[in-house]
Image (cartoon, helix red, strand yellow):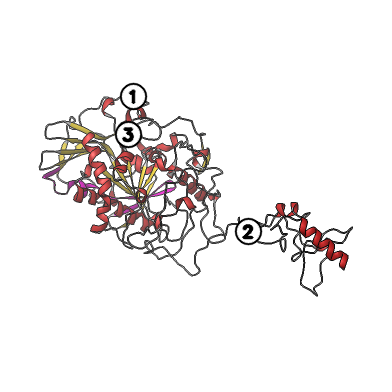
Amino acid sequence: PRKKKRDQQQQTEQAPAGEAAPANDNQQGQNPSKKRKQDHQVAPAEQTPAAEPGQKPEKHRKPAGANEPTPETTPVPTKKEAPAEQPAPKAEQAPAGEQPPAQGEQPQDKTKHRKPASEQPATGQQPATGEQPATGGKAAPAQGENPVQGEAPADKNAAPILDSQKDARRKGRESGQGGRNQNGEQQNGGQQNGGQQDAGQGGDQGGKSVAAPVDQGPPPASDKAAQQEIKPEKIVPVTQEKGTRLDHAPDENIRDRRRPKGVDVLKQIGDRVIIQLNDQTFVQSNDRPRLTRGAKDVYYEDLPQGRTRETVERGNGVRIVTIRNRYGDILQRSRIGSDGREYILSYVDERSYQDENDWRDPGDDLPPMQLTIPRRDYILDSQNVDNPDDYYTFLEQPPVERVQRLYSINEVKRSARVRDIARRIDLDTLNFEFGSSSISDTEVQKLQGVADAMEKLLKENPAETFLIEGHTDAVGTPDANLALSDRRAEAVAEALTNAFGIPPENLTTQGYGEEYLKVNTSAPNRENRRVAIRRITPLVAPVASNN
């Protein structure tokens, strides 16, 4: 014993100060590989006794009276054991017993999803209604400044950035490629959010073979550059063609409108109609009341080939003239000033429509989107806006890729791929009451920055067109959410006109319900209940230099 104690003291004096072996192999924060490298080091006497000469040092010291394990049975950490500072992620589950209502949304979030640290809201930042605030977009992409295929976020609950990617996953799910996970949530077409095969990576979209992404280089520098692929067309004045006056508005009942073959009316919810086209469901509404409110006179005319012309005369001498095809789609809309000058707000070549194929997705003709800019340059989250001028700076930017042809407003509404060409503002600070589409006076004031940006853009070009999108979370029935989101988009357009004077003809609306979630969860989520705005002018109207 005396020799053993002497050897122990000598080794203790030789060991560096403060260096001690861990009490056991599973000590918190200990890296197994580093532990094995330190096995040859000797711990201080009060923790681990020195080994007898000719023996291997023992790694553990148990309390007196305990049977000490032999070296063969001493537990050794395996590769499957995760270090304490890098715990394995836990699957998030909805609270037990939480059931969605039969209609619409939940009034507030009952579950919260962990976001990356870079996307956490600022300390003390609280939403107006106490709901979970939407998160950022300020964080730079993980890999440099050129994200790949829409910069799929690492968070497993974050949906792809591009609507066309979400469309591809939804179509894959409906064609039987998806299913439900162990929590009962719908999977995204069998794909993980890491994006092993997104819409931006080629492959199969809903059973259709699509082309691989085409590298189009950096985004166009201007609207004119974005339209360089479009051959200038000779556009005749919107009033040039002679028509026959009608005594009432055509298709006053939205349910009875003419629609192409293959379009089915599923149901009517108030003044909205839910229709199904191929594998997607849409909501249709009538924008005439918004455009004709307060008008001096409104009249309609029949034109050849089943088209109609609507003229809205205002007290200031301005006329808004819209030509629609037999299905109600806008072919041309112009504002004619009191001086007789015509501004083309939207125009599409009628030859782009071919009888029964009128409502095909024009995005099918395009390769998957290749997004080459950071998320923060593609989506502006209003909660991250520090200077109201940021709205103007963002909205004036051109599309992120070249436009192959001019599209009708209705084509842009129905095609996620075409819509993706235009940048997006998420009004994630705007709050609606549960199940309501009305906006309080407090919430209307949050539109001031966007309205000022629109007004400034319209002074530069009176022919600008802005698409206002409505979105909901995935709680409630899809059809009810479609109607609710459409009413909310319309409410924002009404507020921009009534409170800030933005002309109604420069605004078009569409609700998308729960089809394009921002956060991929079936639980109530504040970030998914949002209104978005895109400047779609370069998609639907020729720039002045091309006209």
Contact between labelled residues 3 and 2, with CB atoms less than 8 Å apart: no
Disc on res. 84: 2
- Determine which quarter of the picture holds residue 3: bottom right
Mark 1 or mark 2: name the one nearer the start of the chain: 2
Residue placed most toward the observer, 401 or 324: 401
Image quadrant where one finds the C terminus = top left
**Percent of width and height locating residue 210:** 50, 36
- Determine which quarter of the picture holds residue 313: top left
Does 228 sit above or below residue 313? Answer: above
Does 367 sit above or below residue 263? Answer: above
Three-letter residue code for mark 3: Pro
- Number of callouts: 3
Q: Which residue is label 3 attached to?
A: 538
Q: Which residue is label 1 attached to?
A: 231
Q: Nearer the viewer, mark 1 or mark 2?
A: 2
Q: Say few, some or many: other residues with alpha carbon within 10 Å of mark 1 (under 14 / 14 to 19 / 20 or more).
A: few
* Distance (Cα) linking label 2 and label 3: 53 Å
User: Secondary structure under badge 1?
Assistant: loop
Residue placed most toward the observer, 192 or 11: 11
User: Secondary structure under badge 2?
Assistant: loop
Q: Specify the segment rendered in magenta.
A: 272-298
User: Secondary structure under badge 3?
Assistant: helix
Three-letter residue code for mark 1: Lys
Image quadrant where one finds the N terminus = bottom right
Three-letter residue code for mark 2: Ala
Mark 2 or mark 3: name the one nearer the start of the chain: 2
Furthest-right residue in this view = 54
Does 437 sit above or below residue 496? Answer: below
**Percent of width and height locating residue 72:** 83, 61
